[in-house]
Structure formats: structure tokens, C-alpha cells
């Protein structure tokens, strides 16, 4: 039994190489009773999805003709289709016909033999509603697709249970030659969407298949801007995933909107900035009609997205763009500088502070400044950079009257407390709305070193009597 799995899965592969008369006789003996044979069960378990095995108790499981077509053994297929009792269009436990298996596995000669039979339906779907040409397109078997296309009654636009057509599958998998064959047919619809509303162009864009995208865009009837269920057009998908070549091809089309947002109002430029795809950002900005300040659902502009994620290269590109507002806040009043300060992205902070029009004191919805945010998070390098900036107010409180020093003391950031206390204009005793001074906050939270640093300050409060608030 230990050899059963291998022999069940590969005997046909060996048989195709050299099928002697004796081996042919033995094979026909097995195939005549194959529906109930243990090797049929073993083969099905190896090649089919687990969900497909749900009908394993149904009869027929897998006939001898199915098996010979699966392996592509021409001699055996020729004999079996002429045997009494064999139905060339018989479905197996998963609804697949012998033609479907031959097409799926790319057995050109077997497909040709089966198609010559007048009682073979080339459009017969399996339990997934996928036809033989759907399988051949999915697997990229160009010669098989070509054979099937010779049948006048072939249905090119028939979708499977995922609403995906043969063209959709070929585009998704990047089978360029199959796509080319299908697009040569006049009766094909190149814009049919699948269950996620993704057209063949959208599927090819997602996977970055440049050659397929190029073929599709050569069709005048292809919609380059058709969105999927999440609102992503092909350009949005390509920009999000950083497929530079696809973005370039799409931008050459004039009849579409390069600012088209998805369902979260995020544009292709916004997604490219968020993911840090520098070359894609450059390509998009070469279009005069691309808006570099268009915000997403949360109000985040491309610059804010890049700053938040620390993509220095993208930030630099955007700051060089004419008309970019470096202080534009999102819906929480967080500017790009505030977003970068929260995450501790020193390189981004440097780039932003090189702009004379950047406001280092602009607070967010909680009145928290970039300096206060960096102090609270313990970003030493960011705090030092901001303190070097002319006009920075080191005592500006948030809506709870917490200054940067109080934020650092509360969290026990010793180095930052020391850095802030080196500034003569820093007030070390100003209380918050609860009456707690920086010394009181540090003492209450057990930050002994911070307490000592504050006491050493000449005008510090030596008796933190306000610990209870």
C-alpha cells in the first residue's frame, strides 16, 4: 500500500512513454473497472481540491475514459471511446467530462480526438461552472485553446461560479498567448467582470502582467477605468502594488481619470505614496491632471501618507512638486510633520523642516504639537530636530495642559526630559488640568531618574505635593 499513492498518480505518465501491448491490456483491465477502483480514489485525493471530494460517494467517481483523458494516453482514449457502454460526455463526481480533463492538463491530441465526436459538448461545465476552454485558459494551454476555438459553437464569454471568463483567467495568470488568441475573436467581451467586479484588465493589472495589459489596451473597446467592488480601477490596483510598467501603460491612455479614488476616497497617487513606490509616484506626477493634494477618506493627502509611513524618497518627490501643501492636515488636524513625529521618522522630519513654510507648532485635534507628540513617544532624535527649529514653542500645551516636558515625564523618557530641561525657556513646574506638575507625574509613575532630573533644576518643585491631582 505504501506505493499506491505514487503509482495511482503517475502510472499514466509512465504509460505514455512506452505502452507495450501487454501494458495496454493490463491498463484496459484496470480502466474497465476504474469507477470503483482504489487507485481512482487515490488519484482524486491527490489532484482535486478537498471540497471537490464531497461527491466521492456518488457514482460514477471517475471512469476509465476520464482517467485516460486525464493522463493524455492517446491509444487508450481511442480504444475506450469506441467501446460499448462508454459515454464520451459522461461527468465524473465533480461534473468534469473527459474533454475537460484533457483540456485542463493540456493534452492536445486527446482534445482533438474528443472534439471530432459529434456528441461531445465543448461547453459542458463542471460543478464550478467552468468549461473546458475555461480550464485550458486558466492553465495556459495555448494549443488546446486554439483547438477549442475552431469549434463554431464555443462559448467564449461563459463565466464560471466566480463569474470569471476564460479571458479573465488567462489575464489573471498572465498567459499572454492565450489572451492574444481570445482577443482575436470578434464575439468576445473583454470587459466582463468577475464576482469581485474585476475585469480582465483589472486582474492583469493586479498581478503586474505588462504584456497582457498591453494586449488588452490595444482593444479600443476595453474600459481602462472600470472599478472593482472596492472602487479600485486598474490604475489604482497597479499603483497600490507598485507595478511600474503597468502604471506606465495605463497612463498612456487619455480616456480615463488618473485621480479616480477607491471606496475610501484614496487615489492611485495616495496609495503609491502610502506604499512607498517612488517610481510609480514619479510616473503619476508626470501627468498634469494628477492632483497631489487630493485627500482620502480620513483626509490624508499623499504627502501625509508618505510621511506617516516614513517613505523619505516619496516625501522628497512630493515636496519638489509645485503646489503641494506641506501643512495640509487630515480630518484629525494632523499635518505631515505631526504624522512623521508620531512615528519617529527623523529623515522625513528633516526633509519637511527644510521647507520654510512648514509650521512646526501646528497642533492636531487634541492640541498636541509635533514636539509634544515626539516627546510623548520617546523619539529623541525627532525632539532634538524640532528644538533646533526657530520659533518652536517648547511649552505649548495640549488640550489637557500637558506640555512636551510633562508628556516626557509622564512616560519616563529620561533622555528627553534631560534634553528639554537644557532649554532655559522650558517651564518645569507648570501643572496640567489636574494640577499635576512634571515632577508630580514622574513621581506618581515611579520614574525615579526623571524625578531627580527635575529636582536638580534650579526652579523645580522639590515637594511633589500634587501627586493625587
Image (spheres, rainbow, N blue to C red):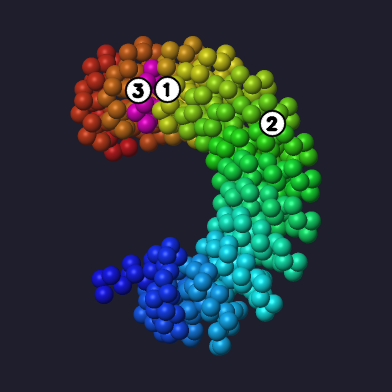
| Residue 49, visible in the rendered structure | no
The image shows residue 186 at horizontal and vertical percentages of 79, 56
- Residue topped by disc 3: 380
The image shows residue 63 at horizontal and vertical percentages of 49, 80
Q: Which mark is residue 346?
A: 1
- Residue topped by disc 2: 291
Q: For the N terminus, which image quadrant?
A: bottom left
User: In front: mark 2 or mark 3?
Assistant: 2
Element type at mark 1:
helix
Q: Main secondary structure of the magenta part?
A: helix
355 lies above or below 277: above
83 lies above or below 276: below
Which of the 4 image quadrants contains residue 255? top right
366 lies above or below 42: above
The image shows residue 283 at horizontal and vertical percentages of 64, 29
Q: Which mark is residue 42?
A: none
Q: CA distance from mark 2 to mark 3?
A: 35 Å
The magenta-colored residue range is: 372-384
Q: Is residue 55 magenta?
A: no
User: In front: mark 1 or mark 2?
Assistant: 2
Amino acid at each position: 500500500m505504501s506505493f499506491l499513492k505514487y503509482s495511482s498518480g503517475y502510472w499514466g505518465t509512465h504509460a505514455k512513454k512506452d505502452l507495450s501491448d501487454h501494458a495496454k491490456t493490463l491498463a484496459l483491465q484496470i480502466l474497465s473497472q476504474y469507477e470503483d477502483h482504489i487507485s481512482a480514489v487515490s488519484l482524486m485525493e491527490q489532484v482535486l481540491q478537498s471540497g471537490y471530494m464531497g461527491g466521492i460517494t456518488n457514482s460514477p467517481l471517475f471512469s476509465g475514459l476520464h482517467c485516460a483523458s486525464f493522463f493524455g494516453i492517446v491509444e487508450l482514449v481511442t480504444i475506450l471511446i469506441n467501446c460499448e457502454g462508454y459515454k464520451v460526455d459522461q461527468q465524473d463526481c465533480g461534473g468534469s467530462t473527459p474533454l475537460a480533463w484533457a483540456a485542463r492538463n493540456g493534452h492536445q491530441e486527446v482534445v482533438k480526438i474528443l472534439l471530432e465526436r459529434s456528441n461531445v459538448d465543448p461547453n459542458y461545465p463542471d460543478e464550478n461552472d467552468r468549461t473546458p476552454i475555461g480550464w485550458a485558459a486558466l492553465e495556459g494551454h495555448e494549443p488546446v485553446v486554439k483547438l477549442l476555438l475552431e469549434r463554431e459553437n464555443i462559448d467564449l464569454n461563459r463565466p464560471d461560479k466566480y463569474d470569471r471568463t476564460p479571458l479573465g483567467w488567462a489575464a489573471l495568470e498572465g498567459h499572454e498567448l492565450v489572451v492574444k488568441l481570445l482577443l482575436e475573436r470578434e464575439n468576445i467581451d473583454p470587459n466582463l467582470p468577475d464576482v469581485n467586479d474585476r475585469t480582465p484588465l483589472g486582474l492583469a493589472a493586479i498581478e503586474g502582467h505588462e504584456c497582457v495589459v498591453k494586449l488588452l489596451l490595444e482593444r479600443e473597446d476595453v474600459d481602462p477605468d472600470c472599478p472593482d467592488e472596492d472602487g479600485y480601477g486598474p490604475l489604482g490596483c497597479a499603483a497600490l502594488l507598485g507595478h511600474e510598467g503597468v502604471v506606465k501603460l495605463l497612463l498612456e491612455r487619455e480616456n480615463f481619470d488618473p485621480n479616480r479614488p477607491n471606496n475610501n476616497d484614496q487615489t492611485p497617487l495616495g496609495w503609491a505614496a502610502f506604499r512607498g513606490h517612488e517610481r510609480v509616484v514619479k510616473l503619476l506626477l508626470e501627468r498634469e491632471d494628477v492632483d497631489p493634494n487630493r485627500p482620502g477618506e480620513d483626509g490624508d493627502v499623499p504627502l501625509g501618507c508618505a510621511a506617516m509611513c516614513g517613505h523619505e524618497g516619496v516625501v522628497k518627490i512630493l515636496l519638489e512638486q509645485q503646489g503641494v501643501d506641506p501643512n495640509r492636515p487630515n480630518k484629525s488636524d494632523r499635518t505631515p510633520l505631526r504624522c512623521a513625529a508620531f512615528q519617529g521618522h527623523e529623515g522625513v522630519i528633516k526633509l519637511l523642516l527644510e521647507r520654510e513654510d512648514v509650521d512646526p507648532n501646528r497642533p492636531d485635534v487634541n492640541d498636541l504639537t509635533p514636539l509634544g507628540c515626539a516627546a510623548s513617544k520617546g523619539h529623541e532624535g525627532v525632539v532634538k530636530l524640532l528644538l533646533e527649529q526657530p520659533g518652536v514653542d517648547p511649552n505649548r500645551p495640549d488640550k489637557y495642559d500637558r506640555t512636551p516636558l510633562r508628556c516626557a515625564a509622564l512616560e519616563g523618557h529620561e533622555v528627553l526630559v534631560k534634553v528639554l530641561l537644557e532649554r532655559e525657556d522650558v517651564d518645569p513646574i507648570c501643572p496640567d488640568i489636574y494640577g499635576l506638575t512634571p515632577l508630580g507625574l514622574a513621581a506618581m509613575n515611579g520614574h525615579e531618574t526623571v524625578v531627580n532630573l527635575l529636582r536638580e533644576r534650579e526652579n523645580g518643585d522639590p515637594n511633589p505635593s500634587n501627586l493625587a491631582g
